Image: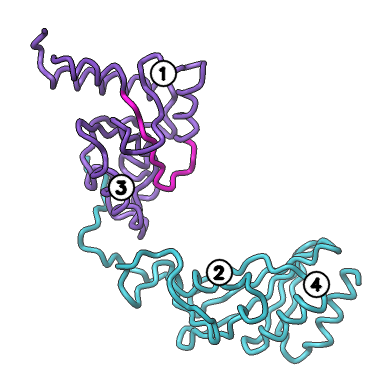
Chain colours: A cyan, B purple
């Protein structure tokens, strides 16, 4: 399949799940989808098209959070980013770890840094933060405030 | 200065600890060890274990996961022990000063003897700092000559 056929196949197969398609460049396509459709779409990209799961990135926006799942289709030199927008009062999405293990660590990292819950993740615990980090404090959120009274935030000069 | 101090200052073995630095300071430290700068002519040798080391070279901003590990390394060092902070990150955390993960500068975690600023410091600056460390230690050991 070439680039156009792949995008057409995705568009036909998931017509009601896709909100918008933004072709940024010949090598880069952003597809905004409904949160409930992520597992089906990722499965189709990974198993049927043969795309490679690169990484996911979480972004804290003003009114909502979004997760971008980046897939590379190496045969046609194309990066497909699936964009999912989550409302701030319901930060939960289905986990992709049952589909491919590569999502295991990045989902744990997004969980600890942004506080997004991944439903069905087999081991949703902290990845990088220390053991004594307080519960419910997510450092990459926009409204993060200093919580440690012992921290020193000047150069001492 | 007794014989022990004399021998100590002529054979400082250093242990290099990178607390997750960007590797720039580490490259400069390695540069000191190459034949061009050849820090071994001052008796300084890179030790493979902290238990064989006299000097602890620290590069990189100290993060939360690192604080207990640095303290443990410092406790494992045989006395007399010296600590050198190399680079802006180890001195004051540099651009990571407001990071959620870097609450303290290095000298609030363990006592530091010599600070070598720079991002990264040149090998000449590192050697100058180590010479000042030796001079400082000599002055502390007293001027009594045997």
Please say if the residues under marks 4 and 3 sit with CB atoms less than 8 Å apart: no
Can residue A26 be seen here?
A: no
Seen from the viewer's position, the closer of residues A138 and B65 is: B65
Q: Which element is circle 4 on?
A: loop
Q: Which element is circle 3 on?
A: helix
Q: Is residue B24 left or right of residue A150?
A: right
Quarter-wise, where is residue A89 in the image? bottom left
Q: Which residues are magenta?
A: B12-24
Please say if the residues under marks 3 and 2 sit with CB atoms less than 8 Å apart: no
Q: Which mark is residue A50?
A: 4
Separation (CA) of disc 4 from disc 3: 45 Å
- Chain at tag 2: A
Q: Is residue A19 left or right of residue B37?
A: right
Does residue A40 sit above or below A58 in this rendering?
below
Judged by depth in the image, the label closer to the viewer, 1 or 2, is: 1
Does residue A9 sit above or below B41 in this rendering?
below
Judged by depth in the image, the label closer to the viewer, 4 or 3, is: 3
Residue behind mark 2: A106
Residue behind mark 1: B40
Separation (CA) of disc 1 from disc 3: 25 Å
Can residue A96 be seen here?
A: yes
Question: Image quadrant for the C terminus of chain B?
Answer: top left
For marks 1 and 3 on the same chain, the one whose residue lies earlier in the sequence: 1
Judged by depth in the image, the label closer to the viewer, 4 or 1, is: 1
Question: Image quadrant for the N terminus of chain B?
Answer: top left
Q: Which element is circle 2 on?
A: helix
């Amino acid at each position: 399949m070439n680039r156009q056929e792949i995008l057409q196949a995705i568009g036909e197969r998931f017509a009601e799940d896709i909100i918008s398609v933004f072709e940024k460049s010949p090598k880069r396509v952003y597809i905004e989808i409904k949160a409930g459709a992520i597992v089906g779409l990722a499965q189709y990209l990974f198993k049927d098209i043969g795309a490679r799961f690169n990484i996911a990135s979480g972004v804290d926006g003003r009114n909502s959070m979004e997760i971008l799942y980046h897939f590379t289709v190496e045969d046609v030199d194309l990066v497909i980013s699936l964009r999912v927008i989550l409302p701030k009062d319901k930060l939960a999405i289905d986990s992709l770890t049952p589909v491919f293990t590569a999502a295991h660590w990045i989902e744990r990292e997004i969980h600890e840094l942004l506080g997004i819950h991944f439903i069905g993740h087999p081991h949703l615990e902290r990845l990088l933060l220390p053991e004594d980090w307080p519960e419910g404090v997510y450092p990459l959120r926009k409204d993060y405030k200093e919580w440690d009274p012992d921290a020193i935030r000047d150069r001492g000069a | 200065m007794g014989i022990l101090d004399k021998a100590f200052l002529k054979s400082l073995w250093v242990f290099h600890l990178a607390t997750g630095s960007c590797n720039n300071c580490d490259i400069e430290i390695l540069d000191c060890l190459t034949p061009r700068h050849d820090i071994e002519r001052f008796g300084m040798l890179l030790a493979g274990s902290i238990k064989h080391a006299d000097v602890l070279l620290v590069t990189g901003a100290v993060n939360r996961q690192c604080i207990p590990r640095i303290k443990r390394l410092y406790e494992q060092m045989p006395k007399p022990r010296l600590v050198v902070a190399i680079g802006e990150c180890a001195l004051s955390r540099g651009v990571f000063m407001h990071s959620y993960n870097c609450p303290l500068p290095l000298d609030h975690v363990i006592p530091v003897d010599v600070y070598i600023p720079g991002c990264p410091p040149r090998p000449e600056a590192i050697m100058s700092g180590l010479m000042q460390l030796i001079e400082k230690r000599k002055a502390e050991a007293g001027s009594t000559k045997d």
